[in-house]
Image (spheres, grey):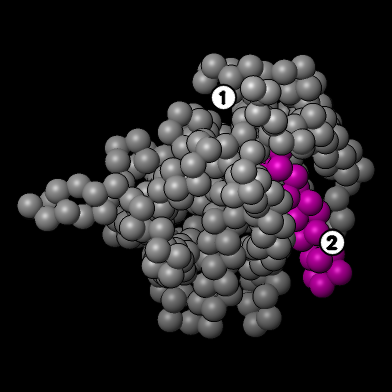
Amino acid sequence: MNASSRRWDLAIWFFAFGYFATYAPYSALDKALAEGHWPGMQGPISGFALLPGSVLATFAGMLAFLGLSGWWRLAGTRRVLGVGVHLPGPWTFLSGACTAAIIMTTTLAYTFQGVSIVFMMLLMRGGVLVIAPLVDAFAGRRVRWFSWTALGLALAALLAAFAERMSFRISPGAALDVGAYLLAYFVRLRFMSRLAKSDDPGTTKRYFAEEQMVATPLLLLALGLLALWNGGPAAAKVREGFLLLGGPLKWPAFAVGLLSLGTGIFGGLILLDRRENSFCVPVNRASSVLAGVAATLALHLLAGQRLPSPFEWAGAALLVTAILVLSLPTLRPSRPPAT
């Protein structure tokens, strides 16, 4: 392994720290706004009302990131009216659409009343841990014993999340949100496995740039169309969110969007690492689970929110154990065969 490849392999741990450092304040601020704990708020605010401001900030931040990094130049070139234009291909377009769904469902996840950050994280993070070895199996990658062991631990964590309630029922909105999140991740990981996991960092950067060129513009367009639609409570809340852009809550909403951008950049680069999903996904999930615990503790100290229950702590511990089981055998970089 040459020095450049070695640095790229170690970069995943920098991305993991960045993911943690952005995810903790992102989820805490998202939850605080949803429950009306921001100074000057008169009460809770709907997650749909938070989306316009946060997505607008994510869109502007992503344009700045792609422009300053120069990664947009790596996107494929296609002829439009006889002119070469940097545009994503059909598969990265679909992956970007899945990323848009992930951004929306993640922001909404922490705004449901009556469910904690840790509980939603157990469902979403545990679910993606379950998906990771399945994606590897579909892609023809060998799934080793420790991946199946961690799969069992992830399932146990999900059972712990529901054990306290003595029921597998959650609100229809929360269930739909988690289901859409997991489906989007499954499709996105499949595309990444086929098209982006490579020894060449340029391939990774090109895929990331093309995916991000789709995700936030598509989500912003969808929100605009939803706001113009006259029916349904969700449309009314989105219209309310656009109106909030002229009020004092626009700044915390923009902060949510910029922090979401950070999670998207760091989290996406973790998943695009050349190693198998059964390694990359646990690194990604570990950062977010620890960030969720940190956010919960911060809200407890600053806003008097309840601490995680013993069942939620147990679920988080099982997920961390699953992460260790998955990660330890693959921490050492593979060595080239002897010649």
Looking at the picture, which amino acid does disc 1 mark? Val
- Which residue has dot 1 on it? 135
Residue found 17% across the figure and 54% down from its top: 84
Secondary structure type for disc 2: helix
Report if residue 289 is visible in the image.
yes
Is residue 171 in sight in this rendering? no
Q: In this view, does 332 lie to the left or right of 18?
A: right
Q: Is the magenta stretch mostly helix, strand or loop?
A: helix
Estimate the spatial distance between the alpha carbons at disc 1 and disc 2, rounded to whole Å: 33 Å
How packed mark 2 is, by other alpha carbons closer than 10 Å (few <14, some 14-19, many 20 or more), is some
Image quadrant for the C terminus? top right
Q: Which one is in front, 85 or 262?
A: 85
Q: Quadrant of residue 96?
A: top left
Q: Which residue is drawn at 78% across and 22% down?
A: 146
Q: Nearer the viewer, residue 58 or 331?
A: 331
**Percent of width and height locating residue 24:** 72, 60
Please tell me whether residue 257 belongs to the stretch shown in magenta. no
Residue range of the region highlighted in magenta in the rendering: 282-303
* As drawn, 58 above or below 162: below
Residue found 44% across the figure and 43% down from its top: 203
Residue at horizontal 63 percent and vertical 17 percent from the top: 142
> Residue 297 in the image: x percent, y percent?
84, 61
Most extreme residue toward the left, as rendered?
Answer: 82
Q: Name the residue under label 2.
A: 297
The answer to whether 240 appears left or right of 189 in the picture is left
Mark 1 element type: helix
